Every structure is written in structure tokens, then in C-alpha cells.
Amino acid sequence: ERILHVEMSALQKKFYAWILARNYKALNQSQAGRLKGSAAAANRSSLMHTLTELKKCCNHCYLFPSGLDEAEKMAAVEENKKTTEQQDTNN
């Protein structure tokens, strides 16, 4: 087994900060997020075990209900930056 130390992505850093701040609202938002009953309960982050949640954030941040939404937002921002930079270099 080899351990590789790499920097966390921007999305992972955001979730890490939310977990440490116990920001339940941000962690539990989701695109489909208007689930009812036991489906909603199963989809919620309770943060009962903070260390486990931090590990999950570093390894699999898409397991949080808002993971996919945040990734899409960040991808759109990056795409806008690239488009702007290309336009600037062409001018």
C-alpha cells in the first residue's frame, strides 16, 4: 500500500469547512433534495461522527446530498474563467 499526499480540490475544501462548522443546511441541500420521509432521512448528513465525515469528504465528497450540485456550480465557474481567458488572449 502506498500513501500519496495530494491537495484537496476546491469542492473538497468547501465540504471540509462545512463539516468543521457543522453547516447542516449547506450539506443537506440537493438538486432532487425535496425527498419525503425515510428517503430524506437516509439522504441527510447528521455529522454524528465528525472524523468519519471528514474522511468521507476527502475520499468521496459526492456522497453528500449537495455534492453534485456544488460540483456543477464549480465546473460552470471554471468554464466561464476559461472562456474569458481565451477571449482576452484572442483580443
Image (cartoon, rainbow, N blue to C red):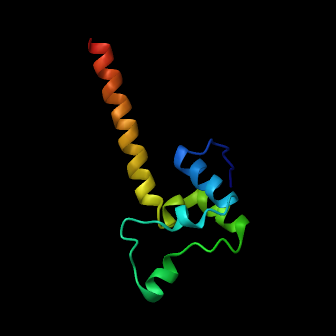
Q: Is residue 52 visible?
A: yes
Q: Is residue 45 left or right of residue 62?
A: right
The percent position of residue 2, horizontal first and vertical second, equals: 68, 50
Q: Residue furthest top?
A: 91
Q: Is residue 49 above or below residue 11?
A: below
Asked if 65 appears above or below 36 in the picture, the reply is: above
User: Who's the residue at 68% across and 58% down the image?
Assistant: 21
Taking the spot 62% from the left edge, 57% from the top edge, the residue there is: 18
Furthest residue to the bottom? 37
Image position of 43 (left or right of 47): left
- Where 47 sits versus 75, above or below? below
Residue 88 drawn at (x, y percent): 32, 16
**Rendered residue at 46%/81% (across/down):** 40
Identity of the residue drawn at 43% across and 45% down: 74
**Residue 47: where, in percent of width, then height?**
66, 71
State which quarter of the image contains the C terminus: top left
Image quarter in which the N terminus is found = bottom right
Q: How many marks?
A: 0
Q: Is residue 58 visible?
A: no
